Amino acid sequence: MIEPSQPLAPAGESSPAPRRYGAVAGLVAGAVAVSVGMLSAGVIDVVSPINAVGSEFIDRVPPWLKELAIRWFGTNDKLALRVGIFVTLGIAALIVGLLAARRVIAGVIGIAAFGLVGTLAARHRPGESGAAALPPLLGAAIGIPLLIQLLRPTTDRPVETPGPSKVPLGWDRRRFLVSTGSAAAVAVVAGGVAQIVEHRRVDSIRKAIPAALPAATEVGVDVPADATLSPITPFITPSNDFYRIDTALSFPRISLSSWKVDIGGMVDKPLTFSYDDLLARPQVERIVTLCCVSNEVGGEYISNASFQGVLLADLLKEAGVQSGAQQVFSTSLDGWTCGFPVAVAMDGRDAMIAVGMNGAPLPLEHGFPARLVVPGLYGYVSATKWLRKIELTTWDAAEGFWVPRGWARDAPVKTQSRIDVPREGEHVAAGPTKIAGIAWAQHRGVERVEVRVDNGPWQTARLGTDVTDDAWRQWVLDWNAAPGKHTIQVRATDKTGATQTADVAPPDPDGATGYHTRSIKVA
Ligand SMILES: Nc1nc2c(c(=O)[nH]1)N[C@H]1C(S)=C(S)[C@@H](COP(=O)(O)O)O[C@H]1N2
Ligand SMILES: [Mo]
């Protein structure tokens, strides 16, 4: 019933939607726009607008904020970013809706602005075709009229207000609930299907990974049992436990049949290899410890695996590196880059284009179809996953991804060590026990590890078999634990005779230093 005391809105002039409905309409229209964008991106196989914006954010985020994110969220930093993007979008959509309830044009401008940001981000992602601009445009093209429609007052049927109501005339609450409800359902379904499409995409890449690789023609050292001394850290890290660090929000689109790696730039003869070309070449297998420059003292971003691949030096010799080339600069399928000295590539170490890890083809997480592995350098200057090309160039001509973000251009791994047991804060039973862990100084090799308890004398630990200078070495020290609180410290000395420094330094710009220290209680 229409309250007789309330005049009907004059024909042709509609009263605006109440604000809170505006907020709901904004949220729902935004959700439809985003989910349609994600779904259409999946269907036409281009980058999702959300991932495009997220990746652009990762590429542009100031170093301090990135550090903070890693400190707070660790390897969950990408999940945190994704949640952050959705929360930000949600709040923005609420505001756009609130404004649109007053002036529809505000809603139009708001959604169009987000469409534009998505379009610019998608266009800017490396390796994306112009079609990547379509999903965010489509999302906006659907979101704008939807918002207008949701907020459109209607005088099609009488507005029922059972009592005195603040709802302006012309506003049909029931119609609003039905239409926003349906739109929200569309968003949920489109978002869900978009997820399924993305999972199927990643699944189909995994299915393309061959079951096995041709046997390596030259196999590295076997791993003797007493290479493992730490009870919690196997000498060879299973691939599933291998630390993972990269800027990728989802996996690049990889088609094994068309994938190739180019070696070009300052070379006499540019070369291109398909996956089969690489597999057809002589393969070596080498045990190499990879670590991340972001690893804090005592941190987890270090792992050891047996990598199989083609020696980089052989490929570079075949291509003919021109004099004047200073940097081996590589780019991934997703546009990540890094570079290391040509001298390092040619000094005889086993730098390789790896296709295998721990006896199987590289897992997708670790760079399938191929990645670079360079013993002795931190991953951020050398270990390009999802490798696309290698260019020989100068230092002036190209900068790896992390270098303009404040990290060092040259980044050899620092000599370091870690206590694995006892764990921090552990309550140890008094009596004979073991202190054990790992030490590393890739490509120089670990000569000695020493442990001290409560600032006492340094005691030399027993070392695990010296498998290769390019991998970590494990160590153990028998200790008769006396009741009380104790502080344990460790330090390593590499084969150049250099002992790791006690000076405490943060990871940036070229790797953390200081002694790993653990506090424990013995009772
Ligand atoms: N494409 C790509 N490759 C990359 C990175 C990246 O962000 N993208 N990160 C590098 C860094 S910082 C490290 S420490 C190693 C980690 O390799 P992993 O994830 O296999 O352990 O990969 C390197 N290769
Ligand atoms: Mo790293």
Image (spheres, rainbow, N blue to C red):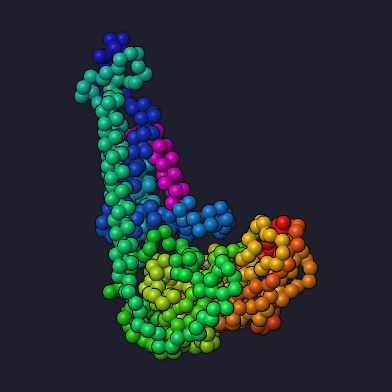
Residue 229 relative to residue 461: left or right: left
Residue at (59, 73) in percent of width and height: 229
Tell me where residue 317 sits by quadrant. bottom left
Residue 209 relative to residue 375: left or right: left
Q: Is residue 50 depicted above or below 437 in this figure?
A: above
Closest to the observer: 413 or 441? Answer: 441
Residue at (69, 71) in percent of width and height: 478
- Which quarter shows the N terminus? top left
Residue 85 relative to residue 144: left or right: right
Tell which residue pokes out farthest to the top in this image.
5
Residue at (39, 56) in percent of width and height: 51
- Which quarter shows the C terminus? bottom right
In terms of secondary structure, what is the magenta stretch mainly? helix
Residue 490 image offset from top left, x and y in percent = 69, 69
Tell which residue pokes out farthest to the front in this image.
431
Whether residue 247 is visible to the viewer of this picture, yes or no, is: yes
* Residue 220 within the segment the image draws in magenta: no
Tell which residue pokes out farthest to the left in this image.
156
Q: Is residue 41 depicted above or below 453 in this figure?
A: above
Residue 175 image offset from top left, x and y in percent = 26, 28
Residue 494 image offset from top left, x and y in percent = 65, 79
The range drawn in magenta is: 82-107
Closest to the observer: 488 or 406? Answer: 488
Residue at (75, 62) in percent of width and height: 482
